Each structure stands twice: as C-alpha cells, then as structure tokens.
Amino acid sequence: MQVNLRSFKQKVTKNAKQLRSFLTKLEKRAPQGLDNLAEYLSPQVWAETDCLSCANCCKTMSPTFTKTDIKRIAAHLNTTPKAFTEEWLEYDKKDKDWLNKLRPCQFLDLKTNMCSIYEVRPADCAGFPHLTKKKMTEYIHVHKQNVEYCPATYKMVEKMNDLIGS
C-alpha cells in the first residue's frame, strides 16, 4: 500500500510518545512469545507498506557503513575505499561509525525512490527496519527511534500495542 508521508508524520506527531512508552514497557518486561508475535505481524505490516512510495529512511537517516560495506561499495563504484569514504562519508567519533555526509542519501534517486547501489547497499540498509531481529528486546531501542521515521516500524509497534498493550 502506498505511503502518504504527510499523513504518516501527522500520526507520528500524535502517537509517537505513546508508542515509545509502550516499547519501554516491552523492554522492561517483554511478554513470552514477543519474537513470534513480530514474525506473525511482519507479513501484515509489509502488505500495508510500500517502501518505494516512501523512502523516508533514505531521505532522513543514514545507515552505518561497516568496513566490509565500504570495500564492497567502493569496488562496485570502481574506486578505492579511501576515495569513497573521503567523498561520501563522515566518521562519527562518538559512536565510532561511518555515516553519510548527506541527507537524503547520495544513492537515492528522488524521482523513483530507488537505490542506485541496491545490490551492494550497506548491511544496515538491507536489514532495515529490523522488524524481526531475533531477541526483539535487544532491538527495542532501535524501534523507539525508527517509529518516527519508518511507517513499517510504526505499523508494527501500533499492531503490537493493539494486541498486547495495556
């Protein structure tokens, strides 16, 4: 289903605080079967979310680039890892991560919302939004952030809250 970013942002403004509070409760006291619930809800979430109509993650966030990502992408672009990092990335000394210098992502085609390096994209992008990572409680801090940026994360947390929230 096509994502309306304006509508999504309105829902986030209205509900993000409550959904983050729900996630904090899950973090402190996760119900049994939480990972199974995520696996059950994930296909429903993706049936309702068309990433290509959104690309909000690529427009507003940066993935972390591992050394392996940098080597793979640089080779794909016929450049060196050093030249690639100098041109496109910045090093976050606090978190010790390589991040995009630019937002939106330099590899996002804003007309089609498609990634020009999709087949070699960073692992962080390939796994995003990490809805069904095993041991979901270890990723709740990520979902707390992503609920504001990703309609799929928002829908997942909303569905979980509807089913098990108090």
Image (cartoon, rainbow, N blue to C red):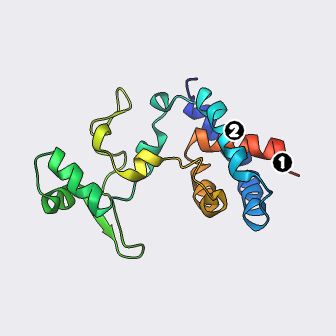
Label 1 or label 2, whichever lies nearer to me, is 2
Q: Position of residue 28 (x, y in %)?
A: 76, 67
Q: Is residue 92 above or below residue 118?
A: below
Q: Position of residue 78 (x, y in %)?
A: 10, 47
Name the residue furthest right. Answer: 166
Is 37 displayed left or right of 81 in the figure? right
> The N terminus lies in which quarter of the figure?
top right
Which residue is nearer to you in this view: 157 or 5? 157
- CA separation in Å, label 1 and label 2: 14 Å
Label 2 neighbour load within 10 Å: few <14, some 14-19, many 20+: few
Identified at 24% across, 57% down, the residue is: 70
**Three-letter code, disc 2:** Tyr
Q: Position of residue 133 (x, y in %)?
A: 57, 52
Q: Position of residue 26 (x, y in %)?
A: 76, 59
Identified at 27% across, 59% down, the residue is: 68
Residue denoted by label 1: 164
Sequence-wise first label, 1 or 2: 2
Using the rendered view, name the quadrant where residue 158 is placed: top right
Q: Secondary structure at mark 2?
A: helix
Q: Is residue 90 above or below residue 51?
A: below
Is 144 displayed left or right of 127 in the figure? right
Using the rendered view, name the quadrant where residue 109 is placed: top left
Residue denoted by label 2: 40
Which residue is nearer to you in this view: 26 or 13? 26
Label 1 neighbour load within 10 Å: few <14, some 14-19, many 20+: few
Q: Secondary structure at mark 1?
A: helix
Is 61 displayed left or right of 129 in the figure? left
**Three-letter code, disc 1:** Ile
Which residue is nearer to you in this view: 46 or 8? 46
